[in-house]
Image: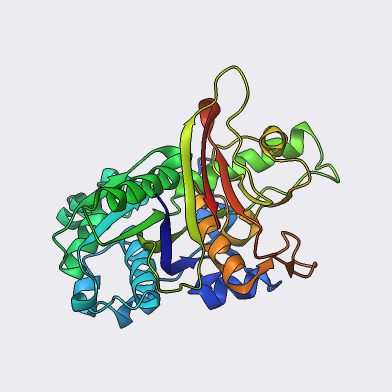
């Protein structure tokens, strides 16, 4: 079954909203934030792509925000942006709405804070709010409360393939007629463990070998959220692409189940395979791009790739992965494939028309 993208909302190290994402794709520079990571040898300064959730105050009262941690705020901001873009922020225009939240690391940052409450010497006991917000489905729960929605609500944690799994579930819900629309997205918060792991990985690469000329630089550790509103394909036109097919599985011996397309957006962040592993999945002569430098290294990068695919189709442009290069025209008849390879020979893809 096909599904139409009716709205997109994003927040990340590049800024908030589709205009900010579009600006960076067109060549604007993303400024990292230095994060201090405490270690046994002393604090380590790690450049990261941090997201600002300040604009969430336009949607949620301040007195309610104080109960939400950063992970939840990321999800809510991107979700509200997507619903505003789809023009269904008004409850009477939504119909039956399903909510699906994908996350690779979940509320890991808040979980660490709750496990070690005495390090800052300010808390004499664990915070009940931190405890209640330390579960992975906290973002989905707060979304249903903020939107006053009683429909299907689901959270998916599947490492690198969390968002492809969520997208496939959303399309299935529409096919079954369980809902009229699905708010589906990915959320990942940067925690100290992730930032320090990125730092160690980069240092190890410098020791083992120098960066080769043809090797893509390691993207900075990042965080953010991306949501899309999906509906069954209807007669009314939408500026965004239509999802023709979703795929998810594990590659075994024999021919690879390659998705056919003319333009591939590759998700090379997280625990995914290297660029060399992607080559055998791509159709000969097809164009490819990886935008990890825009949103950073995070496990729900497929969600941001979906947003970039939506912008590419809307603007009829293929944005260059090199910020110095100019976008080129995207022919109307060319399909866009968002491809993600995970650990253990797993894969997930989405084909857009």
Residue 282 drawn at (x, y percent): 69, 40
Identify the image quadrant of the C terminus: bottom right
Number of disc labels:
0
Q: Is residue 65 left or right of residue 295?
A: left
The furthest residue to the front: 235
Relative to 346, does residue 100 appear above or below in the rendering? Answer: below
Q: Nearer the viewer, residue 226 or 350?
A: 350
Q: Nearer the viewer, residue 83 or 234?
A: 234
Q: Taking the image as drawn, is residue 134 in sight?
A: no
The furthest residue to the top: 253
Q: Nearer the viewer, residue 129 or 147?
A: 147
Residue 324 drawn at (x, y percent): 79, 68
Q: Quadrant for residue 55, please give it.
A: bottom left
Q: How is the image coloured?
A: rainbow
Relative to 265, does residue 57 appear above or below in the rendering? Answer: below
At x 25%, y 64%, the residue is 68
Q: Is residue 56 left or right of residue 188?
A: left
Q: Is residue 36 left or right of residue 87?
A: right
Q: Nearer the viewer, residue 75 or 314?
A: 314
At x 23%, y 76%, the residue is 93
Residue 114 drawn at (x, y percent): 26, 48
Residue 145 drawn at (x, y percent): 17, 65
Relative to 268, does residue 75 appear above or below in the rendering? Answer: below
The furthest residue to the right: 213
Q: Taking the image as drawn, is residue 187 in sight?
A: yes
């Amino acid at each position: 079954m096909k599904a139409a993208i009716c709205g997109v909302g994003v927040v990340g190290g590049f800024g908030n909203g589709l205009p900010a994402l579009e600006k960076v794709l067109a060549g604007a520079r993303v400024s990292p934030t230095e994060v201090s990571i405490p270690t046994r040898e002393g604090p380590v300064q790690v450049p990261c792509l941090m997201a600002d959730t300040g604009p969430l105050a336009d949607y949620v009262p301040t007195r309610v925000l104080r109960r939400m941690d950063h992970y939840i705020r990321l999800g809510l901001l991107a979700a509200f942006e997507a619903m505003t873009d789809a023009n269904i922020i008004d409850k009477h225009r939504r119909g039956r709405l399903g909510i699906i939240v994908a996350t690779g690391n979940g509320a890991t940052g808040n979980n660490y804070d709750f496990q070690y409450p005495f390090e800052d010497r300010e808390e004499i006991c664990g915070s009940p709010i931190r405890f209640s917000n330390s579960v992975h489905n906290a973002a989905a729960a707060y979304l249903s409360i903020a939107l006053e929605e009683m429909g299907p609500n689901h959270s998916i944690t599947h490492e690198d393939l969390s968002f492809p799994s969520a997208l496939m579930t959303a399309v299935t819900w529409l096919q079954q007629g369980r809902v009229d629309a699905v708010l589906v997205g990915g959320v990942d918060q940067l925690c100290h463990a992730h930032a320090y792991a990125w730092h160690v990985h980069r240092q190890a690469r410098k020791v083992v070998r120098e960066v080769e000329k043809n090797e893509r630089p390691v993207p900075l550790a990042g965080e953010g959220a991306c949501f899309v509103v999906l509906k069954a394909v209807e007669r009314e036109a939408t500026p965004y692409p239509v999802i023709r097919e979703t795929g998810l599985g594990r590659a075994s011996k024999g021919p690879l189940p390659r998705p056919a397309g003319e333009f591939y957006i590759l998700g090379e962040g997280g625990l995914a395979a290297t660029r060399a592993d992607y080559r055998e999945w791509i159709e000969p002569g097809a164009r490819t791009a990886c935008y990890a430098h825009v949103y950073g290294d995070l496990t729900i990068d497929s969600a941001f790739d979906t947003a970039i695919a939506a912008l590419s189709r809307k603007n009829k442009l293929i944005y260059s992965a090199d910020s110095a290069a100019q976008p080129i025209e995207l022919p109307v008849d060319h399909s866009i494939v968002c491809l993600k390879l995970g650990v253990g020979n797993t894969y997930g893809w989405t084909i857009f028309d």
